[in-house]
Amino acid sequence: MRLDELDMKIIDMLQEDSRRSAAEIAKKLDVHVNTVRYRINRLLKTGVIRRFTVLLDPRALGLTVSAALMIKLEPGKTESVTSRLMEMREVTNVYQLSGEYDLIAVVFGTDLLDLQGRVNAVRRIDGVREVNVFVTTRVLKSDVRYNLISTDPRVGALKRGRSFRHRGVA
């Protein structure tokens, strides 16, 4: 599916605040509300928008320590280990890699002792061969939004608002 400038503006506004009504978006973009509703439904059906959700601040929940776990796996254990990691509520992100490590998992804890317990739980998963822990010392950027629109002439066509084809790649 092709995303045009209107699609990208709608997405941008929803990323800023997904509670925005179609009427509010339509008014700001000077288009009919039915056009906005149609576009949002189409973006949902095609998977460009996966879902609407709430973003929590881990620190506000008392989860003040995080780490990236670089994980090496036993051969043939990728599916079982990733399934187990994705079930663990303390693990917020899991990425499969090429190279020296097979996976990266991001884990949160209330303090270093709690974090260590969570790391040990990952180490005990059948099929995990090695876990290298990188404790976060400072968060420089943490944003789940993807900026589709920019006025900076140095960025690519997508960010300048030109149309692009969505290929369903996460």
Image (tube, helix red, strand yellow):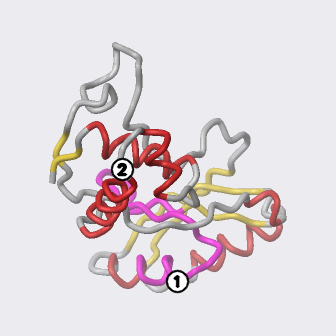
Q: Is residue 95 left or right of residue 162?
A: right
Is the C terminus in the top left, top right, bottom left or bottom right quadrant? Answer: bottom left
- Residue type marked 1: Glu
- Residue type marked 2: His
Viewer-closest of 44 and 140: 44
In the displayed structure, 29 sits above or below 152; it is: below
**Would you say residue 92 sits in the magenta stretch?**
yes
Residue under the image location 31 percent in, 54 percent down: 35
Local secondary structure at mark 1: helix
- How many marks are shown on the rendered structure? 2
Sequence-wise first label, 1 or 2: 2
Please report the bounds of the magenta region as a residue range.
Answer: 82-105
| Residue 87's disc number | 1
Viewer-closest of 80 and 76: 80
Mark 2 crowdedness (10 Å alpha carbons): few <14, some 14-19, many ≥20? few
**Would you say residue 28 sits in the magenta stretch?**
no
Residue under the image location 49 percent in, 45 percent down: 13
| Residue 32's disc number | 2
Q: Quadrant of residue 98?
A: bottom left
Mark 1 crowdedness (10 Å alpha carbons): few <14, some 14-19, many ≥20? few
Q: Residue furthest top?
A: 153
Residue under the image location 45 percent in, 72 percent down: 129
Task: Find residue 9 and report its horizontal and vertical position in percent.
Answer: 39, 40
Q: CA distance from mark 1 to mark 2?
A: 42 Å
Q: Is residue 72 left or right of residue 61?
A: left
In the displayed structure, 87 sits above or below 25; it is: below
Q: Quadrant of residue 44?
A: bottom left
